């Protein structure tokens, strides 16, 4: 065990003071002794008890609060943990932390160190740690559900199931190797069907929406010719004036991005310059940006002539300014009367939901997808092999990739960056 891991760490685990209540957490071999020095006799495990919290240096009262003792290894970190619930002023928290840090073997925690110890002690794996980081940063309902599923071990369970099947196949491959020199037919080993089935399962997860989409949102572009009502529609969907609206053609010159949530689904709404040929240098640049935005968008709201609408199922044709009369074959919409706006929102929600992670299936982030893809590729190579030695090697490579997903191998360089995203008390 590294020397730093033998320390007992302490940090504020609740929100920044001032607050009604603050939670200060300690974890490590000296957590109980430090608690006895500050709060007297330890309470029964997992039972909150009111204690006078005193500075051991002079016996001065710091505060009165609740003390809870969680003996390891069945704790969040896998170590002895003591939590203090006290009044949430900066002065109280600082005095309590200072009194604890003054005890032998106790020091202030680094960002994410509590969770890092949970990973080191096998309480969680790397997919759960990354899910927890995503949960702490969640800003919308889809992101929260996706992160919570990962933090609760949803992906870990899937990966462990795949790894167990690969391990069983590897064991059979080793038996086949041992019997390879037998003259009486050896050991019959033909795992192709099982490998194909496993590769198909992995493909389904690889083809599912990535967790980054829950954070970044579905990219929804509003496009069409000048004065088609694009900015007015953006403002109506956003519920506030985010884009300038005038009767002058070419008002919008740049891309205007508006993050919002529609039915709990994160969407980045993009207003664009009107599409037309222009001798104005600045407007021409804006038109170029608009065309590029159309090419890379997930969904498109088209407010222009029917024959000029881009092809594709992810395009909704809108007949804007419906309050002025019929305006084409698209969905009639008026931002003045509100006609059609609910229909636009319903279409966006119907199209966007399949593009974000679901609450039933854990998603992969970019790092995990790369490694899971390597695992799938090794399995596909193994499917075509008959030599048990070569097959066993591909199965080993597949397991190694999964071990890197869960943090059991080859991820030391990743951990500092990951846990640096956490707050001090997590």
Image (spheres, rainbow, N blue to C red):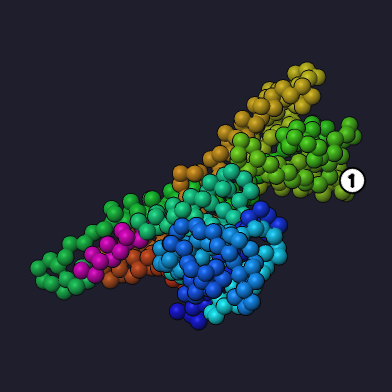
Q: Residue furthest top?
A: 325
Please indicate, yes or no, whether residue 111 appears anywhere in the rendered image: no
Q: Quadrant of residue 45?
A: bottom left
Does the segment drawn in magenta span residue 165? Answer: yes
Taken as a whole, is the magenta stretch helix, strand or loop? Answer: helix
Residue 135: x percent and y percent?
57, 53
Q: Is residue 252 above or below residue 161?
A: above
The local crowd at label 1, few if under 14, some if 14 to 19, many if 20 or more residues have their Cα within 10 Å, is few
Q: Quadrant of residue 275?
A: top right
345 or 194: which is nearer to us?
345
304 or 271: which is nearer to us?
271
Task: Report whether 2 appears left or right of 242.
Answer: left
Residue 232: x percent and y percent?
79, 33
| Quadrant in which the N terminus is drawn | bottom left
Question: Which residue is at a point 75% across and 32% down the rendered structure image?
Answer: 236
Task: Report whether 319 appears left or right of 209.
Answer: right
Disc 1 secondary structure class: loop
| Quadrant in which the C terminus is drawn | bottom right
Question: Over which residues does the magenta segment extend?
Answer: 162-175
Residue hosting label 1: 280
Please indicate, yes or no, whether residue 164 appears anywhere in the rendered image: yes
Q: Is residue 300 above or below residue 406?
A: above
Residue 307: x percent and y percent?
70, 30
Q: Is residue 346 above or below residue 403?
A: above
Residue 39: x percent and y percent?
55, 68
Does the segment drawn in magenta span residue 164? Answer: yes
Q: Is residue 412 above or below residue 319?
A: below
Question: Which residue is at a point 32% across and 56% down the rendered structure image?
Answer: 195
Question: Which residue is at a point 64% across and 48% down the rendered structure image?
Answer: 139
Q: Quadrant of residue 105?
A: bottom right
Question: Which residue is at a point 77% across and 45% down the rendered structure image?
Answer: 256
Q: How many marks?
A: 1
């Amino acid at each position: 065990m590294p020397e730093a891991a033998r320390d007992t760490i302490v940090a504020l685990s609740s929100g920044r003071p001032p607050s009604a209540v603050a939670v200060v957490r300690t974890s490590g071999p000296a957590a109980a002794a430090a608690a006895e020095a500050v709060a007297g006799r330890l309470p029964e495990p997992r039972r909150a008890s009111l204690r006078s919290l005193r500075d051991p240096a002079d016996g001065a009262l710091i505060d009165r609060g609740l003390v809870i003792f969680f003996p390891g290894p069945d704790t969040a970190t896998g170590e002895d943990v003591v939590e203090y619930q006290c009044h949430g002023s900066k002065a109280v928290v600082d005095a309590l932390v200072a009194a604890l840090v003054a005890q032998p073997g106790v020091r202030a925690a680094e960002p994410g160190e509590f969770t890092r110890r949970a990973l080191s002690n096998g309480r969680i794996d790397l997919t759960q740690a990354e899910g927890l980081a995503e949960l702490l940063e969640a800003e919308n309902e889809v992101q929260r559900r996706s992160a919570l599923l990962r933090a609760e071990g949803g992906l870990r369970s899937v990966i462990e199931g795949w790894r167990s099947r690969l391990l069983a196949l590897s064991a059979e491959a080793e038996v086949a190797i041992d019997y390879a020199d037998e003259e009486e037919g050896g050991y019959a080993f033909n795992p192709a069907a099982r490998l194909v089935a496993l590769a198909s399962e992995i493909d389904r997860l690889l083809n599912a929406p990535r967790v980054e989409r829950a954070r970044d949102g579905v990219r929804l572009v509003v496009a069409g010719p000048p004065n088609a009502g694009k900015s007015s529609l953006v403002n109506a969907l956003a519920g506030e004036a985010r884009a300038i609206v005038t009767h002058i053609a070419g008002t919008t010159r740049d891309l205007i991005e508006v993050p919002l949530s529609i039915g709990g689904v994160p969407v980045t709404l993009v207003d664009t310059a009107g599409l037309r040929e222009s001798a104005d240098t600045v407007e021409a640049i804006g038109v170029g940006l608009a065309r590029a935005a159309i090419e890379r968008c997930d969904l498109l709201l088209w407010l222009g002539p029917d024959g000029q609408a881009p092809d594709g199922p992810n395009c909704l044709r809108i007949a804007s300014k419906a309050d002025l009369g019929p305006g084409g074959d698209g969905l009639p919409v008026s931002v003045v009367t509100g006609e059609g706006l609910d229909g636009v929102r319903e279409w966006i929600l119907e199209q966007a939901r399949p593009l974000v992670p679901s609450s039933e299936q854990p998603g992969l982030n970019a790092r995990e997808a790369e490694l899971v893809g390597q695992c799938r590729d090794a399995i596909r190579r193994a499917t075509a092999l008959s030599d048990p030695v070569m097959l066993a090697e591909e199965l080993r490579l597949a397991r190694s990739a999964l071990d890197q997903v869960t943090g059991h191998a080859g991820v030391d360089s990743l951990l500092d960056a990951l846990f640096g995203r956490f707050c001090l008390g997590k």
